[in-house]
Structures are given as C-alpha cells and as structure tokens.
Amino acid sequence: PETLQEFIDELARQAAAMQRMMESLSPEQRAELAEAMQQALSDMGLQDEMSRLQQNLQTMRPEFSWSGQQSMSGEEPLGLPDATQALAELADLESLMDQLSDSDARANLDNIDEQAVARALGRQAVDDLRAMRDIQRQLEEEGYLERDGDRLELTPKAVRRIGRSALKEVFSSLDVSKQGDHSVHRTGAAGEITGLTRPWQFGDEQPIDVVRTVRNAVNRKIMSGDAELKLRAEDFEVHETETRTRAAVCLLIDQSFSMVMSDTWGAAKTMALALQSLAASAYPLDALEIISFANVAQVVKPHELPELEASYIQGTNLHHALMLAGRFLDKHHSAQRVVMVVTDGEPTAYIDAEGYSCFSWPPSDETIALTVAQIDLMTRRKVPISWFRLGNDPSLERFLDQMARRNGGRVLAASSERLGDYVVSDYVRARGAR
C-alpha cells in the first residue's frame, strides 16, 4: 500500500476475510481456532487491541463483506494464512462482479475501482480498463454514444456507422464477379437522369439533350459544308434515365434461442444491419420493415438492431411474424412487395384469438395450419417469399420446400458465413424483378 487509505483497505480486507472464514467453519473447528487465537493474543497482551482494531475496521469499511459462510472444498488442505488470503481474493472478485453488473458503473467506467481490478485480475486488466475509458470518452465526444440516465445508448449516427460496416463486410465477401454497384438499373421514360445519352429513336419519351443535339448539327454542317444550320432527325440525342422502383420489403428473422445455440444469431444481426444500411443509402424510397420472431413476433426499429438479443423463451412463431408482415405490406399496395424469412427451425408457436402465444413441440397441427394460412395470404397478395434456411434440420427442409412450391417462392440453404451475401443479393434481385 502506498497511502494510509490503501493500508486501511488492505487491513479491513484481510480482517473481513478472516471473519468470513471463521463463520464458514464447523462449531467445533471455530471454537478450537478461537481458543488458540485467544491464547496467543493474551500471551502477547494484544487481545483487547485486536478486538478494537476489528471493530474500527468494520466501522470504517462497512461496504466490505464481513459476514456470510463460504463453501470450501478441495483436494489440498490450506493453512490459516492461505485460507484467509483465498477468501479475501474471492471477496475481491465478488465485489468486482457487483461493480461490473451495475448499470451505472458500466455507463461510467470511472466508477470501477482500479485497485480491486488490480488485485483480482492483475495490472494488465487495469491498463485494459483505462483503454476502455479512453474509447468510451472518444465515442461520446464523436457523437456515437449518449447518456440516458444511468445508461449509455448508441446514437443514430452510431447505428448508421455499424450498418455501413456490416454492409461493407457483406460486400467484401461476395464473389468478385458480383462485386461493384449492386443497384439494379433499368432505363425507361420516367426516372432520374443517369448522365448518359444515346441517339433518339422513334417512340422515345426521354428528355432531349439540347446541347448534344445542337453540337451534332454543328459538327455535321462543318463536315458537309452546308450553308445553313438545320436540325435533322439523326442529330437528336436523348438522356438515358433510370427507373427506380419503390419497394416494400419485410425481413423476418428467427430470434429463437436455437439461433444462439447454432451460432447463427450474430450473422443474422450483421445481415439485418447491412440490409438496413443498403436500403437507406441506395434505395431511400424503399420501405423496409424488420420483424424478429421467437415465441412472439415484434417489429424492430433501426436503432434497436445493434442491441437486439435472441430470446430465451421457447417458440418459433412464424405465424405471428407473417401476420405483422402482411399488415405492413397492405399499407403499400403500389410498391413492389418483397418478403424474406431467415430461420433455422420449423414453426412451433402461433398467436391465438386473444393474442396469447401457444407453443407446442413437436409442432401441432393447429400451428402448421395457421402458419400455412398466412403463407396463402401472401400468395393471394402475389408476394413470393424467399426462405433462407439455416442448418440441416430435415423437418424444416421439407416444410420450406412445400411452402415454396405452394407460394411460388424459393428456398436458399445458407451458411452463417454467407447469410449476408445471400439476403442482400436476393433483396437487390427481388426488388429489380417485374
């Protein structure tokens, strides 16, 4: 210890560990050890002083753990000093865990005790803590983190940055032949001018490029030696335009715990962030709805995506997810409507008439029937579903193959490594199809 306060902390820490160790002994062991300690202190005339020191330390450091039994077991016996030290180290770890589990401490890393970190985890951990403080401070200064009471939250700027990073990761793993601009361009009479021109053809409705048309006429006059400048049909050029189709896109992501167990949940989140970023940057007119489903389904807002976690409640409620998707698509009749579903298991839950989730395993006939009914509604809306199957569940494979034939959609068997590639590419393909 370098200061008086640190010295008092160390004494109190050891005294508290000693007291907890005494309480952890059997009554016979406790009585025997207390008698031996009392005899030793009496011989040195220190019994009263040690008692007062114990009381003073407990008064000065009440936050230390001064009571409670510890379960002690192991193959090698420990002497009194080693046992006391072990209990002191356990107390440090427990105190550190309490600090790290406190939301206020996580939001403000300055509240975490460096000395406790050093005792429990070593000096390298203190250096790591200080580095984390610097990173947190920098993220706040740059507008990526903001405080909401005792919580730190990602700002919209941070969500956009994460989305762009996810999209870059997806595009970087695509085949070289598929890289580049992933927009789908179709020329037509209406739309945005691309900057390209071409000779006018009979029936064209694109706007005329006046500058290039006049330039063509002047060049022709110079080359031919005509005395007068007259426009001819071959002089005319028109602007190429790009038709940007507005799409209404629903991405349904399986949020059940099996996604964590199969190590695909992280890839699903990255894919959703990438798709959100692509839609916002390349297709700003598109309406994108992301729906996660476990025992129930929910609409996920863009700012909620980075912190979205898998559910620990049983159930894969595709029925509810398709219901929410249908309500969203019904608001966008004039748009090109797209539905994509990412799942690793067949449906095992549905929403009853009163709004309660009903789970059954194996899937009940009612679960399957209600889910199929929602798929049939998508078919009547003329919305084919793209299914992205994760894993090798034979039951899921049979179910999705049947649903794809029934709905006119398609099934893609995707690995977690290529999930983002598949979904983003399918989004571009589907919204560009007519």
Image (cartoon, rainbow, N blue to C red):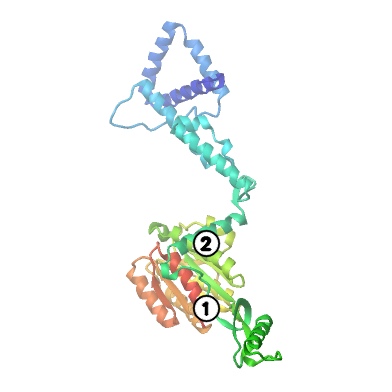
Q: Name the residue nearer the viewer: 421 or 380.
A: 421
Establish if 210 lies above or below 281: below
Q: Name the residue under label 2.
A: 273
Q: Looking at the picture, which amino acid does disc 1 mark?
A: Gly
Secondary structure at numbered mark 1: helix
Circle on res. 46: none
The answer to which quarter of the image holds residue 285 is bottom right
Query: Horizontally, is 148 left or right of 393 in the view?
Result: right
Q: How crowded is mark 2: few (under 14 residues within 10 Å), some or many (20 or more)?
A: many
* Type of the residue with mark 2: Leu
- Which residue lies under the disc numbered 1? 432
Judge whether residue 196 can be spotted in this image: yes
In the image, 156 versus 257, the foreground residue is 156
Helix, strand or loop at label 2? It is helix
Residue 133: percent from the left, percent from the top?
56, 40
Dot 1 crowding, Cα within 10 Å, few <14, some 14–19, many 20+: some
Question: Could you tell me if residue 349 is visible in this image?
Answer: no
